[in-house]
Image (cartoon, rainbow, N blue to C red):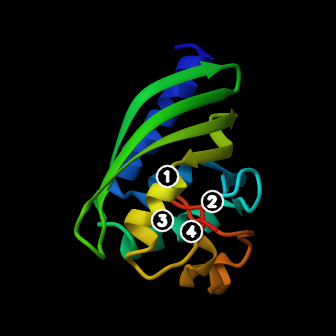
Amino acid sequence: MSVIDDNKDLVRRYFEALARFDLDAISSLMAPELRFRCAGGTGAEDPVVFHSPRELIDDLRHNLRVLYDPDPDPEVLNLTAEADRVVAEVRIRARSLETGEVYDNLYAFFFWIRDGVFVEIHEHLDTQYVWKNLLGPAGIASGAQMPWLDEPESRAVSGPGLLFGHGFAQSR
């Protein structure tokens, strides 16, 4: 396999591990210096940034216990790769724990890979849909008000947001 094929396979393994809620497998795909950025709901302002696999995994663990059922269904629709980068168009379905309704959103992920692990990931999604279908019903006015971001293990997060459906605020 080529390096590009290897990189695309790494991204597929990430979403397969997410579907199994295998946080150890997800973490093993990341460099210790991983930087994860989730775009904010106000353009380039207010992104959520995680600076290690631990911060990202802590956030994901909370999201899947507080906002979603623990059985997300990520479907990789398209992968495009060049050099050390892979872009993934992904449809993620889950069920809101608050309403029981189906959550069905489209995402664009950008992965940078070095030495067979992720060194940077950017996530983009429909933030208004997330607020309407997950945060609002859970009584959370914005990503910045998610209670777990105030916990010591998540303090390095900057700005409002969360992984896998966050990084947004209610319309102003």
Compare marks 3 and 2 and give the one earlier in the sequence: 2
Instruction: Residue at 67%, 35% (x, y): give it.
Output: 113
The image position of residue 15, as x and y in percent, is 42, 43
Compare marks 4 and 1 and give the one earlier in the sequence: 1
The kind of secondary structure element at disc 1 is: helix
Label 4 sits on residue: 170
* Amino acid type, callout 1: Ile
The kind of secondary structure element at disc 4 is: loop
Q: Residues within 10 Å of mark 3 (few under 14, many from 20)?
A: many
**Left or right of 103 in this view: 172:** right
**Residues under labels 3 and 2: Cα distance?**
25 Å
**Residues under labels 4 and 2: Cα distance?**
27 Å
Compare marks 4 and 2 and give the one earlier in the sequence: 2
Instruction: Residue at 63%, 34% (x, y): give it.
Output: 116
The kind of secondary structure element at disc 2 is: helix
Label 3 sits on residue: 131
**Left or right of 172 in this view: 136:** left
The image position of residue 24, as x and y in percent, is 47, 59
Q: Residues within 10 Å of mark 1 (few under 14, many from 20)?
A: some
The image position of residue 37, as x and y in percent, is 68, 53
Asked if labels 2 and 4 touch by Cβ distance under 8 angstroms, the answer is no
Asked if labels 3 and 1 touch by Cβ distance under 8 angstroms, the answer is no
* Amino acid type, callout 2: Pro
**Residues under labels 1 and 2: Cα distance?**
9 Å
Asked if labels 2 and 1 touch by Cβ distance under 8 angstroms, the answer is yes
Label 1 sits on residue: 26
The kind of secondary structure element at disc 3 is: helix
Asked if labels 2 and 3 touch by Cβ distance under 8 angstroms, the answer is no
